[in-house]
Amino acid sequence: MKILVLGGTRFFGIHMVEALLEAGHDVTIATRGNAADNFGDRVKRITVERTSAESMKLALSGIHYDVVIDKLAYASNDLRIAMDAVNCDKYIQMSSTAVYNPKKLNTVEEDFDGLERPVIWCNRPDFPYDEIKRQTEYALWQEYADKKWIAVRYPVVIGKDDYTGRLKFYVDHVKTGTPMYIDNIDYQMSYIRSDEAGGFMAYLVDKDITGAVNGASSGTISLREIVNYVEEKTGKKAVLAEDSEDVDKAPYNGDPEFSINTDKARALGFKFTDIHDWIYELLDYYIEG
């Protein structure tokens, strides 16, 4: 298949492109051209300013793709720019489980209603992350209902290549005895490993599905379980502050207890690994680093 990837040179986008290439697809990546990649001559490249309608139309005019995977559609205006510029049979958008309000145990795709509120055409700074992602999906559901599209919803993506350092935060604070404030330490939460996040998006390109689909590792884990493991492995004791004043706030503060239902993905034949089969190895990587 002829596939255009908007983005794909960072974090789990790299795993996604590698999976597409391994499956034999003809892949073009469209980026600003600022980030180097290791794909060599296995991909074609287009240089484009993703947030510029003029640049997108100029770069993509007259080219048809079987599938467009958009990892860069952050806000509804980003989505509109892409939809106006690309010519494709299927569009796959990188959404987020942040659209769910609230997330809860056994969160299913239908827990977000894309027709619930009118679209607000907005840019990245206009709203907090969760509302920005909702507006992007509102645009898909309401303005592009006649198109064949998939919105892929992931919780927090983590892995050795996670440049955000969110999981590493907990490891480093335990190792150094730096106080941290965690407001949801006993809540069970869902995550997904970066290579599987990329692999699942690649898996969807030839699947007969439209609408939203969740992706997440099987099972959940609490921050207390994570902290306890790091304490046991390092012999250090976490310093947990009772309030947030003058201490470091943990990355996942404010998240409710939740799990992400992936029955829809499993029905397509994709099986996610269990979080307990890999997260301790990842923690060991950060502990030893």
Image (cartoon, rainbow, N blue to C red):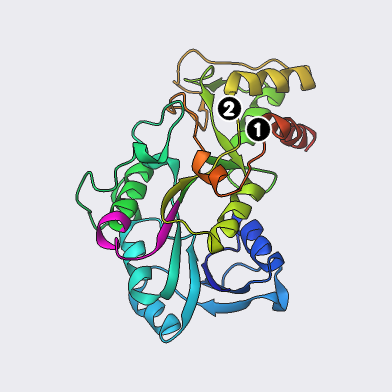
Label 2's element?
loop
Q: Residue at x 60, y 63 (%)?
A: 9
Among the two numbered marks 2 and 1 on one chain, the one whose residue lies closer to the N terminus: 2
- Horizontal side, residue 25 vs residue 132: left or right: right
Q: Residues within 10 Å of mark 2 (few under 14, many from 20)?
A: many
Quarter of the rendering containing residue 22: bottom right
- Horizontal side, residue 126 vs residue 35: left or right: left
Instruction: From the top left corner, tell me how far across and down residue 149 is, in percent.
Output: 40, 61
Q: Marks 2 and 1, how far apart in space?
A: 7 Å
Instruction: State whether residue 165 appears in this view.
Output: no
- Horizontal side, residue 45 vs residue 97: left or right: right
Q: Is residue 147 magenta?
A: yes
Q: Which three-letter amino acid code belongs to the residue tagged 2? A: Thr
Q: Is residue 85 magenta?
A: no
Q: Residue at x 42, y 87 (%)?
A: 62
Instruction: From the top left corner, tell me how far across and down residue 50 is, in percent.
Output: 43, 69
Quarter of the rendering containing residue 203: bottom right
Q: Which three-letter amino acid code belongs to the residue tagged 1? A: Ile
Label 1's element?
helix
Task: Kindly give the residue lying farthest to the top in the view shown.
Answer: 242
Instruction: From the top left corner, tell me how far across and down residue 63 is, in percent.
Output: 46, 84
* Badge count: 2
Q: Residue at x 51, y 20 (%)?
A: 187
Q: Which residue is mark 2?
A: 220
Q: Residue at x 38, y 45 (%)?
A: 129
The tag on residue 275 is 1
The residue stretch that appears in magenta:
140-151
| Viewer-closest of 67 and 82 | 67
Pointer 2 and pointer 1: residues touching (CB < 8 Å)? yes
The quarter of the image holding the C terminus is top right
The tag on residue 256 is none
